[in-house]
Amino acid sequence: MKLVLLSRLAAEGLGTALLVFAGGGALAVNAQTGALGHLGVALAFGLVIMAMVYATGHLSGAHLNPAVTLGFALARHFPLPLVPLYWLAQLGGAALAAGLLRLLFGEGGRVSATVPSGSVGQALTFEVVLTFALMFVIMAVATDTRAVGQGAALAIGGTVALGALVGGPVSGASLNPARSLGPALAFGVGEHQWLYLLGPALGALLGALAYQGLRAARPPRARGKAEE
C-alpha cells in the first residue's frame, strides 16, 4: 500500500515538474528568442498538460495542481488525508523544475514567475474565473461517466491553453498554486503571490461545486426510457 502511494506521489511530482519546466521554459525561450509568441506559449502549456494527463492520469489522477486536488477533495472525489501529501509532491516537483530553469537561463528565467500585468483586482478575477472553468471541465470529464472519458486530456489541455491565451497577458494565467510558487521560490518573486493561491483555490472550489450542483439537478426521466 505504501509503495502504491509513493508511486502516486512520484507521478504527481513528475507531472507537475514537467508542466512547470515546459510551460515556464516556453516563457523563457520566447523571452530569449521571440520564436514562440503568445500563442506558442499558450499552446505549450496546453500541450504539456494534455501529455501529462495521458501519461499520469492512470497513475495518480493527474491533478498536477493543488487547487484541483482541493476541489476534488471538497467535492468528495478524493480522500482528504491525501491532500497534504499531494500538495507536497506537486510543490516539490514545481520547485525542482523552476530550479532547473534558473540553472539554464539564470535571471532570464524570471519570466516563468507569474505576476499581474493588469491591476490586482483584474488578475484575481481572471485567476478565479479561469480556474473555475478548468475545474468545471475536469469534473465533467474525470468524475461523470456520461462524459467522453477518452477525450479528457484533450479537453483539459485545451482549457489550459485557452486560459493561457486569454488570461496570460493580464494575470499570467497560472490557475495553479504550484505552477506559481515553484518559480516564485526559485527567483525570489514574492509580491502578489497570495492571489495565485487564493484565486485558483476559490475558482476550483466554485467550479467543483457548480458541476456537482448541475449533475444533481438531472431532468426527469422520460417515460419508458432507461435511466442513463
Image: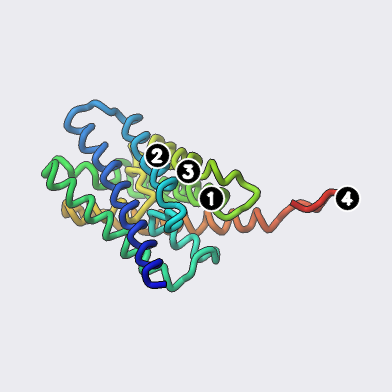
The one nearer the camera, 166 or 83, is 83
Between disc 4 and disc 3, the foreground one is 3
Packing grade of label 1 (10 A; few <14, some 14-19, many >=20) is: many
Secondary structure beneath disc 3?
A: helix
Secondary structure beneath disc 4?
A: loop
* Image vertical order of residue 116 relative to residue 191, above or below: above
Compute the Cα span from label 2 to label 1: 16 Å
Residue identifier under label 1:
136
Image point (54%, 63%), residue name: 77
Compute the Cα span from label 3 to label 1: 14 Å
Three-letter residue code for mark 2: Gly
Earlier-in-chain disc, 4 versus 2: 2
Between disc 3 and disc 1, the foreground one is 3
Q: Position of residue 7 (x, y in %)?
A: 36, 62
Between disc 2 and disc 1, the foreground one is 2
Three-letter residue code for mark 3: Ala
Three-letter residue code for mark 1: Phe
The one nearer the camera, 103 or 119, is 103
Residue identifier under label 3:
153
Residue identifier under label 4:
223
Earlier-in-chain disc, 2 versus 1: 2
Q: Residue furthest right?
A: 224
Between disc 3 and disc 2, the foreground one is 3
Q: Position of residue 93 (x, y in %)?
A: 28, 56
* Image vertical order of residue 52 relative to residue 85, above or below: above
* Image vertical order of residue 16 relative to residue 72, above or below: above
Compute the Cα span from label 4 to label 3: 36 Å
Q: Position of residue 38 (x, y in %)?
A: 32, 31
Q: Position of residue 110 (x, y in %)?
A: 18, 44
